[in-house]
Image: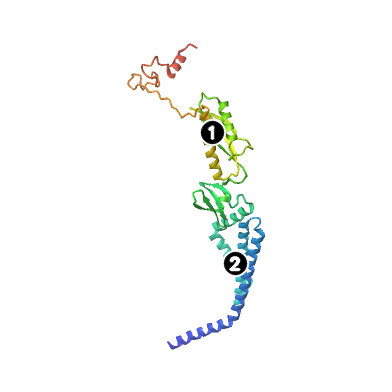
Amino acid sequence: MAANVNVALERVQSIGRDVVAALPNVLIALAVLLVFWGLARGARNLIQRVWGSREGNLGRLFGRLASGSILLLGVLVGVTIIFPSVTPASLFSLLGVGGVAIGFAFRDILQNLLAGILILITRPFRIGDQIVTGDSEGTVEDIQIRATILRTYDNLQVVIPNTQLFTGKVTVKTAYEVRRLQYDVGIGYGDDIGTAKQVIHGTLAGLKQIRQDPAPEVLVVDLAESSVNLRVRWWIDPPRRKDALDSQDEVLQRVKEALLAHGIDLPYPTRQILWHDQTEEADGDRVRQREGWPAGKGEAPPSRWQVVREREQEPS
């Protein structure tokens, strides 16, 4: 028992002597690490200052990458100072094997990192743009290394992986200075199309929230079941969602009031229903059934089946 205690004490004393002997190296390593920390901070500030005028978020990204690389190098130098037996070659070989393992383990993170860098370099959209991707729409608040932060119009935060944005479809609604809006307005079949167009053009000409260059347009786009549909198209500036909603609100209100004031109908959808007497003897017989012609309302027209049979019986 006493022998085991003596062995343990000797080991503790040996460790203590090693620590005391390595203490100068530890202090030197800390000093070196402090120097590298200062270099990392200076490099980050310098990169952010250089890139700040072009794209602040891109500068922050490269600044963080440069700062992290310099700090990692400082840690490696400090390890070689504290443990002289550790050579740079062994450290780099260890980093190579570890890098492969980390690459497999964090593949998705690395993909998002690369996609984030490419997004910041190619800049398909910027911070402040309003975009649509998948079922999400809103304003880009931040482009980070792993994901992009989107703020919806309902004040919700959506975190979208950069890979999804870089490889998927993204609609940038504020990419250009102007934007065109459109809405279909239905008028009655008895109304004059030229008069309706003239009324709509005159109404749009007096609105300040829409652009007059390019000029608004009114086009006939459909002869629908209950109405003749006119497509009203106009341009707005700037092209943000709030401006689009305010513009549409004013255009629809003024156009409706102007058309009604000039006696132009805005018809409701209508349906014509023919009730068939279900007590007739021919009900269910597709050859004799009168296809909805009301009983007692005059002579029923021939059914299409009767017409076909009569044509077949005609001599060739």
**Image disc number at residue 109:** none
Whichever of callouts 2 and 1 sits on the residue coming sooner in the sequence is 2
Q: Looking at the rendering, in which quadrant would you find the N terminus?
A: bottom left
Q: Is residue 279 left or right of residue 208?
A: left
SS of the residue under disc 2: helix
Whole-percent x, y for residue 201 in the image: 59, 32
**One can see residue 83 in this view:** no
Residue pointed to by mark 2: 95
Q: Vertically, is 300 above or below 87?
A: above
Looking at the image, which is closer to me, 299 or 92? 299
Measure the alpha-carbon separation of dots 2 and 1. 70 Å
Mark 2, mark 1: which one is toward the viewer? 1
Q: How many marks?
A: 2
Looking at the image, which is closer to me, 227 or 148? 227
Q: In the image, what residue occupies the spot 61% across and 68% down?
A: 71
Q: In the image, what residue occupies the spot 59% across and 68% down?
A: 94
Q: In the image, what residue occupies the spot 47% across and 87% down?
A: 6
Q: Residue furthest bottom?
A: 2
Q: What kind of residue is marked 1? A: Val
**Quadrant in the picture for residue 73:** bottom right
Q: Vertically, is 82 above or below 277?
A: below
Q: Vertically, is 194 above or below 18?
A: above
Q: What kind of residue is marked 2? A: Leu
Residue pointed to by mark 1: 255
Looking at the image, which is closer to me, 107 or 145? 145
Q: Residues within 10 Å of mark 1 (few under 14, many from 20)?
A: many
Whole-percent x, y for residue 179 in the image: 60, 41
**Quadrant in the picture for residue 36:** bottom right
